[in-house]
Image (spheres, grey):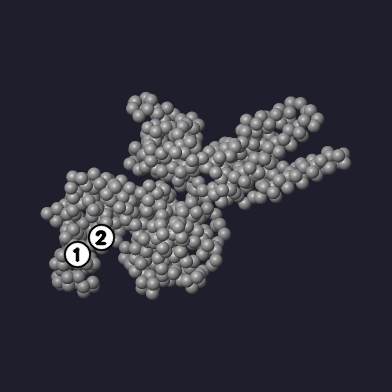
């Protein structure tokens, strides 16, 4: 197509007319502001810019035409208003002053990093595709597909300001599917709102305009403010060091959904801290299932720990459907509350033991005497399995299901009984560490010694009564352990457990090299798992040399350092406690190790390197 015949308002063919018949754009119309590039500006000798589609605090988005491929595009220019200006040539971008140069260059690097990350989603149906990236005119540009349609905000206005629950749910489900891809890649959107959700003419939903650059700049510079959308941003985004995660996007998604069905934007999150005036949708006349409303209000909880911890949990709850098997596809370190009653558990065990004592005294048939004991073991293991699942940490050499399943297979049961005893004790104690709880741990050595004694007696010699006594001791140990676990998990879910509080400054991981280079990873008591598979890790590295779950990282309870534990990875995890030294000083990690401030570790030989720093 002849570039001269292109309309700079819609990129349609206007011929040689001064005014486009399709959109009314008049040839020669200047940019809306002097800061915007003029229509018909040519970038890289290939991209012809049209009118500005929008301008925010950190960038300008233009309509564009690709002269090489003859297609309409959108191009986003890095232009932070607070620290940059357009030069006299009306083309180049430069910092406002020497003082603002560090902020400008920091943001430029973050903008480039955002562009690289967005390239991962080129084939995603729910995310506006990033097609290219380049530096020019002292700044940088992201080339994106152009979405034919309207924003969700415009769509709601066309529908009278709000839409029914079922219609909004169809949009929200597609948004959450896109967010799951974003989170699986180790990223956050940070700016979900009706403005950043597009409804295409074919009905497809796409999200765009990630907030990574502006939030990074706001956190970096004391002179810049983090730009927020009132009502859609959770309280942690109002704090310069607020702990953000998938739950941050959960809140914004829920606020968008609330706006769609009620026609009202929720009150700003900080205003809800002291006195929450959020009105449930049903009280505003919205018709929706009670379970869905409860899920929506939970997703809008002011505190992040009280929300759903990932979008999959939110989706399953708000759809008010039973689990369809997708829950295991997204890893979460959130510990679910116990569904066990220790009263029921202990009563069941006591009933079986009482029956065993009665039958042992009154019935001579050994076959009948063993029935109550089998009952005790089966009931105990079924309930025990459910409790172990609630606190499992991956430290045991087996999974709860595998350990307890093999326990009932002859010739395997004694070995797997050892796995159950010791494995549960290990996971339970790590659970205590992970949540910094002020409670006593289980004696792993006693669990191990008791089981070894049973094994020796079973395979060497038989002492009447002693073997049965040791079995009952083991049963008693498990009863105590599970009763303690019931209390701990239930109390943790209700925030009634006392935690250790350290006055030391919190620690973080700074990524020195790799995909997340330059990022600081804030660690809470639950820590993170770094790996290749989103099903097992919550910080995902794309290299095939990274194991599905490669390394676990969590802070020490006394905040004296960060624990690093290799998860039996193929290519290993290496640590180097000295801030100097050379590559020869790297040592392969076996098990786990406490690293203090200034210490470093890396994934594989040289896939990603991290340093422990003060947050």
Most foreground residue, 419 or 86: 86
Spot occupied by residue 439 in the image (x, y as percentages of width and height): 58, 39
Q: Using the rendered image of the protein, determine whether residue 183 is visible from the camera's viewpoint.
A: no
Kind of element beneath mark 1: loop
Tell me which numbered mark, 1 or 2, is placed earlier along the sequence: 1
Image point (56%, 57%), residue name:
323
Image point (62%, 51%), residue name:
339
Give the residue at mark 2.
55
Residue 612 — which label? none
Give the residue at mark 1.
32
Kind of element beneath mark 2: strand
Spot occupied by residue 135 in the image (x, y as percentages of width and height): 22, 48
Image point (25%, 46%), residue name:
103
- CA gap between label 1 and label 2 equals 10 Å
For label 2, count other residues whose C-alpha is less than 10 Å away and answer few (under 14), some (14-19) or many (20+).
Answer: some
Most extreme residue toward the front, as rendered? Answer: 274
Spot occupied by residue 306 in the image (x, y as percentages of width and height): 50, 54
Spot occupied by residue 432 in the image (x, y as percentages of width and height): 55, 40
Left or right: 39 with respect to 146?
left
Whether the residues at callouts 1 and 2 have beta carbons within 8 Å, the answer is: yes
Q: Quadrant of the N terminus?
A: bottom left
User: Vertical placement of 411 versus 293: above or below?
Assistant: above
Q: In which quarter of the image is the C terminus?
A: top left
Image point (57%, 59%), residue name:
322
């Amino acid at each position: 197509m002849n570039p001269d015949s292109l309309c700079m308002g819609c990129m349609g063919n206007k011929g040689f007319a001064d005014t486009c018949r399709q959109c009314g754009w008049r040839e020669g119309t200047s940019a809306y502001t002097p800061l915007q590039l003029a229509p018909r500006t040519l970038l890289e000798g290939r991209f012809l810019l049209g009118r500005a589609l929008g301008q925010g605090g950190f960038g300008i988005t233009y309509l564009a035409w690709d002269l090489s491929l003859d297609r309409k595009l959108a191009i986003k220019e890095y232009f932070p208003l607070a620290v940059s200006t357009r030069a006299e040539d009306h083309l180049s971008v430069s910092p406002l002053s020497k003082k603002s140069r560090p902020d400008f260059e920091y943001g430029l690097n973050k903008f480039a990093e955002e562009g690289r990350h967005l390239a991962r989603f080129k084939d995603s149906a729910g995310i506006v595709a990033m097609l290219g990236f380049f530096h020019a005119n002292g700044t940088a540009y992201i080339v994106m597909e152009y979405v034919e349609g309207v924003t969700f905000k415009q769509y709601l206005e066309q529908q009278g300001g709000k839409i029914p629950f079922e219609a909004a749910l169809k949009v929200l489900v597609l948004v959450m599917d896109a967010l799951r891809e974003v989170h699986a890649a180790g990223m956050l959107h940070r700016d979900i709102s009706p403005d950043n959700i597009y409804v295409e003419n074919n009905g497809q939903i796409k999200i765009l305009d990630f907030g990574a650059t502006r939030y990074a700049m706001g956190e970096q510079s004391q002179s810049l403010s983090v730009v927020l959308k009132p009502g859609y941003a959770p309280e942690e985004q109002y704090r310069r060091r607020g702990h953000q995660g998938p739950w941050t996007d959960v809140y914004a998604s829920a606020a968008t959904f609330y706006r769609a069905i009620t026609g009202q934007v929720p009150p700003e999150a900080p205003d809800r801290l002291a006195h929450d005036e959020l009105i449930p949708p049903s009280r505003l006349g919205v018709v929706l299932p009670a379970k869905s409303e409860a899920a929506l209000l939970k997703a809008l909880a002011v505190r992040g720990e009280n929300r759903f911890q990932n979008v999959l949990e939110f989706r399953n709850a708000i759809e008010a459907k039973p689990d369809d098997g997708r829950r295991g596809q997204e890893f979460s370190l959130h510990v679910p509350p116990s569904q066990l009653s220790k009263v029921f558990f202990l009563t069941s065990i006591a009933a079986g033991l009482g029956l065993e004592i009665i039958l042992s005294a009154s019935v001579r048939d050994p076959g009948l005497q063993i029935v109550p004991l089998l009952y005790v073991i089966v009931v105990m293991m079924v309930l025990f399995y459910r409790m172990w699942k609630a606190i499992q940490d991956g430290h045991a050499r087996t999974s709860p299901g595998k350990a307890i399943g093999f326990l009932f297979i002859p010739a395997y049961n004694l070995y797997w009984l050892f796995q159950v005893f010791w494995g549960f004790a290990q996971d339970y104690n790590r659970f205590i560490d992970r949540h910094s709880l002020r409670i006593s741990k289980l004696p792993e050595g006693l669990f191990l010694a008791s089981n070894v004694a049973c094994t020796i007696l079973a395979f060497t010699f038989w002492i009447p009564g002693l073997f049965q006594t040791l079995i009952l001791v083991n049963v008693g140990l498990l009863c105590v352990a599970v009763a303690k676990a019931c209390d701990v998990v239930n109390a943790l879910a209700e925030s009634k457990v006392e935690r250790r509080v350290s006055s030391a400054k919190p620690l973080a991981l700074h990524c020195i090299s790799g995909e997340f280079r330059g990022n600081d990873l804030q660690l809470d008591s639950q820590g993170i798992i770094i790996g290749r598979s989103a099903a097992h890790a919550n910080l995902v590295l794309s290299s095939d040399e990274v194991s599905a779950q490669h390394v676990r990282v969590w802070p020490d309870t006394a905040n004296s350092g960060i624990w690093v534990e290799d998860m039996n990875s193929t290519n290993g995890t290496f640590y180097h406690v000295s801030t100097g030294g050379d590559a020869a000083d790297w040592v392969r990690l076996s098990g786990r190790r406490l690293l203090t401030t200034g210490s470093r570790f890396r994934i594989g030989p040289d896939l990603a390197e991290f340093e422990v720093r003060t947050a």
